[in-house]
Amino acid sequence: MASTGRAVVPLPWFLLFFFILSIGCLESARAACELSYVDRGKMYNYGLAAPIPMFPHGVLSEDGFYKVTDDYTTLWFQLCDEMIFNHDPPRCMKCSDCGGTSRCGMGCSALVLEDETGYPVCSAIGHSSNSSISITDEMNPHRGVTVRISNSSQTCSLYVSVICDWNRIQEPKSLKKQGECDYVTEIRHPSGCAKVIHLYGRGWGWFWVFLTIIICVLGCYLIAGAAYRYFFLQVRGIEAVPNLEFWTSLLHRGQSLGTIAAQKLRGASEIGRRAYNPIGSS
């Protein structure tokens, strides 16, 4: 009997290879946007691409790109991924290493256009596979992180400071050029805020640490003194405790102070009861 079902066409191996390769590059870019930083008993965890309330894609622009313009320079970039242009694509005569003239901007994470001579020329300065993340201010980890995106030859870079701001988002407003082809800008975003974990709890504070040290030293002194008097001086019983008279007097003094304090509190409460006259009492 002839089969009436359609034959299953196997997926060409090269398409499967490129699909797996693209997934691997995407995961590598996302991993490059994660950072854990330990400072003074606290771990600061940053995940720029992790979903947060109101922002399911994290710091990634929902338009597919960020855009910032200076006098003669326009820069497009995307964090933790490659750029996507569904509208307003770059129009350049050249678009080397980033999609070519027909698909300019599709295939890199940072693209710069310089129009100093009247001819717009674009060049890629960053790819998601060449991304790294670091603390913006090690003295103040709450400030945020800085993402560095470099091109294939590592000769040009874009530095984007993601400033922590729980209350608002601010897209890049300014662009600075440093050296031949290094650029610096910043955005404000809740994804730049770290999740803080206290590695050793919230700590005891200096007073409790000092008190613990005093108690340990005192305990060692009593144990060592008692052992010395017991084994070398042949002192037995309670008398083996060093400076027994001092500790006994200290205990009695503490009991006396406690008794006096209790009497004062009892007397104050009695005076308060006498001063209070219930309604209707004669």
Image: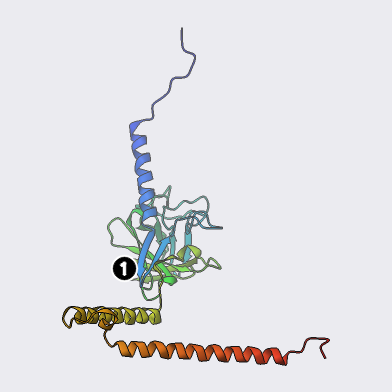
Q: Quadrant of residue 209?
A: bottom left
Q: Is residue 95 visible in the rendered structure shown here?
A: no
Rendered position, 49 above or below 180: above
Amino acid type, label 1: Glu
Secondary structure category for the residue under label 1: loop
Identify the residue at image location x=43%, y=62%. 75
Q: Mark 1 points at which residue?
A: 180
Identify the residue at image location x=40%, y=78%. 205
- Looking at the image, what colour scheme do you see? rainbow
Q: Which of 176 and 62 is in front in this view?
A: 62
Give the x, y percent position of residue 175: 43, 69
Rendered position, 224 above or below 62: below
Give the x, y percent position of residue 193: 46, 66
Q: Residues within 10 Å of mark 1 (few under 14, many from 20)?
A: few
Of all residues, the one furthest to the top in this rendering is: 1
Q: Quadrant of residue 49?
A: bottom left
235 horizontally vs 202: left or right:
left
Identify the residue at image location x=41%, y=56%. 80
Give the x, y percent position of residue 189: 50, 65
Rendered position, 62 above or below 277: above
Q: In which quarter of the image is residue 94?
A: bottom left
Q: Is residue 163 visible in the rendered structure shown here?
A: yes
Give the x, y percent position of residue 206: 38, 81
